[in-house]
Image (cartoon, helix red, strand yellow):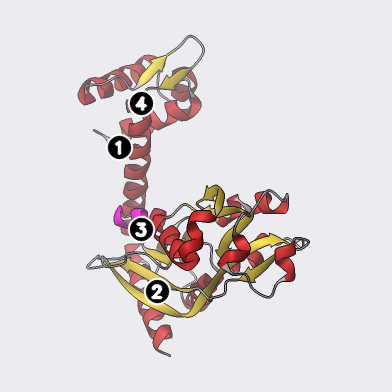
Amino acid sequence: MELRVLRYFLTVARLESITHAANVLHVTQPTLSRQLADLEKNLGTQLLIRGKKKVSLTDAGMLLRQRAEEILTIADKTEREFKDKNNLVGGTISIGSVESLTSHYLFQTLKAFHEEYPQVNYYIYSGTGDDIKEKIDKGLLEVGILLEPINIEKYDFIRLPQKERWGILTQASSPLAQKEYVTPNDLVGVPLLLSSRPTVQNEIANWFADEYENIHVLATYNLISNIVNFVDNGMGTAICIEGALAMTGSKHLCFRPFFPELKFSCVIVWKKHKIFNQATSHLIQLIKYASQA
């Protein structure tokens, strides 16, 4: 399976047209059609549904599209690293980060790093901890900022000293906003928006204790930014970290912490025993040094 053919396939999938893709790729339509047919033959499955007006993907085609994007990302990254090998320190560092205020620790370090190594570029990805771990495992990300609880046995890591408080994000006009803090009993019967991560749900269930059976979960979410509109429109109250309020930028919402208090740490992780490019290796050393200062 050649990288060139995978690029052809992705172009067709994106444009939904063999004719338009052939023009973009500067190849003839028969040549492109033959390459795609050979790809289907080699994989032993149909990838494309060729309609009169557009081309669509089969289930196998959608799977290949996902895998091809991952393969080409790694291939392009590898090529850049070898092209940059003659630089003093250059290349691209890929970083994944959860939505958390404590993640500013790494970006303060990046500012100092950039001043010393201005040739380095960055790719920043936001997602859940599980998403970021998966991309680190696949080599698509090199460094990740994760919010505990999360399994980090496979990674080298530094636990940050700051902790994120858990509580609720609610409308400033709601009765819950008038409280200094909220207890499990305060949230019984309230439409709640809860993280979809099983590890977080387990921690929240432990905090609610006996009242967990009585709560009403209206919706689950993966990123905090996805549920701000729910809260802003009075459709529910989100269970989230305190940093969510600063990330919303809304003057109509407020955060109230849990009582008993529930706090988690953030960790900076990278894959064990991996050989990084020069830029990433220098950044990891700076992170280690800064954490000991």
Can you give x and y, in whole percent of width and height, for residue 142 in the image? 36, 62
As drawn, 219 above or below 284: above
Q: Nearer the viewer, mark 2 or mark 4?
A: 4
Q: Which residues are magenta?
A: 133-138
Quadrant of the drawing holding the N terminus: top left
Residue located at (39% from left, 85% from top): 289
Name the residue carrying label 1. Answer: 3
**Disc 2 or 4, which lies upstream in sequence?**
4
The reply, left or right, for residue 250 in relation to residue 197 is right
**Disc 4 or 3, which lies upstream in sequence?**
4
Q: Measure how far apart labels 2 and 4 are at the Cα level.
A: 40 Å
Q: Nearer the viewer, mark 4 or mark 1?
A: 4
Name the residue carrying label 2. Answer: 283
Q: Can you see residue 245? A: yes
Instruction: Find numbered disc 2 in the image and state the secondary structure of the residue it sits on.
Output: helix
Disc 3 and disc 1 in contact, CB within 8 angstroms = no
